[in-house]
Image (cartoon, helix red, strand yellow):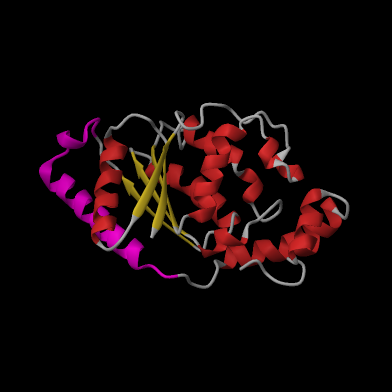
């Protein structure tokens, strides 16, 4: 299994330690090849909103030298892992948000890729407000067509992994290992109902009423046959 891992922080702290436990257990389940990206080191530039990717020219992105390897990993991986700390009341850190900004063209109403509908993803967060970091990432991945999105939030209530009470630390480490085992065994299922509904809304309303023929998203959908067949 090819796994692409996207870290929301370059600091190898609590989230990194939790991710390592998860990945080590995943590797113990079978043959796993891991490719890792650390934000912002591997994507140090903001999206400037040029919209070239929305016009089918993502290879001309001003930050293509960083985005292209990430996009290739996304497309060719069997599974995706997004690991990020939770920052205060503001959900994911800006470095992780920059990643999603740069791949926003993969959503159904722009330029969906059939490969994304074959993938499973896991979101791992650490911090007191983990749920608020998981929710927007999970929503985005569903809109890209990812078949199954799993998640685990680790509410540490301390600044260091090793400072957690032993009972809590053991409980989280056990949860991470069990989550990795389930994720390894997880098979492709029926697309999320929200994905199916979104597809029909985009096909029947967004593409034909608001985007229209002659524009890239519409012509891309027509070329790929998405008006006649689902990409999933």
Give the left or right position of residue 161, taking residue 108 as reference. left
Which image quarter: residue 18?
top left
Against 79, residue 230 (above or below) is: below
Q: Residue at x 22, y 32 (%)?
A: 160
Q: Position of residue 57 (x, y in %)?
A: 72, 42
Residue 179 lies in the magenta stretch: yes
Q: Quadrant of the N terminus?
A: bottom left
- In this view, the residue in front, 159 or 29, is 29
Residue at x-position 80% and y-position 55%: 218
Q: Is residue 204 magenta?
A: no
The count of marks equals 0
Asked whether 155 or 200 is in front, the reply is 200
Classify residue 208 by image quadrant. bottom right
Q: Eyeballing the image, is 117 above or below 126?
A: below
Q: Which residues are magenta?
A: 158-187
Q: Answer with left or right where residue 36 lies relative to residue 53.
A: left
Residue at position x 86%, y 54% from top?
A: 212
Report x, y in % for residue 230. 67, 69
């Amino acid at each position: 299994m090819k796994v692409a891992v996207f870290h929301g922080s370059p600091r190898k702290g609590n989230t990194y330690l939790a991710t390592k436990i998860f990945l080590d257990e995943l590797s113990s389940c079978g043959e796993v090849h891991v490719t890792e990206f650390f934000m912002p080191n591997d994507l140090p530039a903001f999206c400037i909103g040029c919209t070239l990717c929305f016009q089918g020219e993502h290879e001309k992105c001003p930050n293509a030298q960083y985005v292209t390897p990430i996009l290739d990993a996304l497309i060719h991986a069997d599974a995706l892992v997004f690991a990020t700390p939770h920052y205060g009341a503001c959900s994911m850190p800006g470095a992780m948000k920059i990643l999603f900004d740069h791949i926003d063209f993969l959503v159904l109403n722009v330029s969906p890729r059939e490969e994304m509908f074959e993938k499973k993803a896991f979101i791992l967060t650490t911090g007191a407000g983990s749920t608020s970091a998981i929710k927007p990432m999970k929503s985005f991945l569903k809109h890209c067509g990812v078949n199954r999105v799993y998640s685990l939030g680790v509410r540490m209530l301390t600044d260091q992994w090793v400072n957690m009470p032993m009972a809590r630390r053991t409980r989280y480490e056990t949860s991470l290992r069990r989550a990795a085992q389930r994720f390894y065994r997880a098979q492709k299922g029926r697309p999320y109902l929200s994905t199916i509904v979104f597809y029909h809304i985009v096909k029947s309303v967004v593409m034909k009423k608001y985007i229209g023929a002659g524009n890239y998203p519409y012509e891309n959908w027509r070329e790929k046959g998405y008006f006649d067949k689902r990409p999933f």
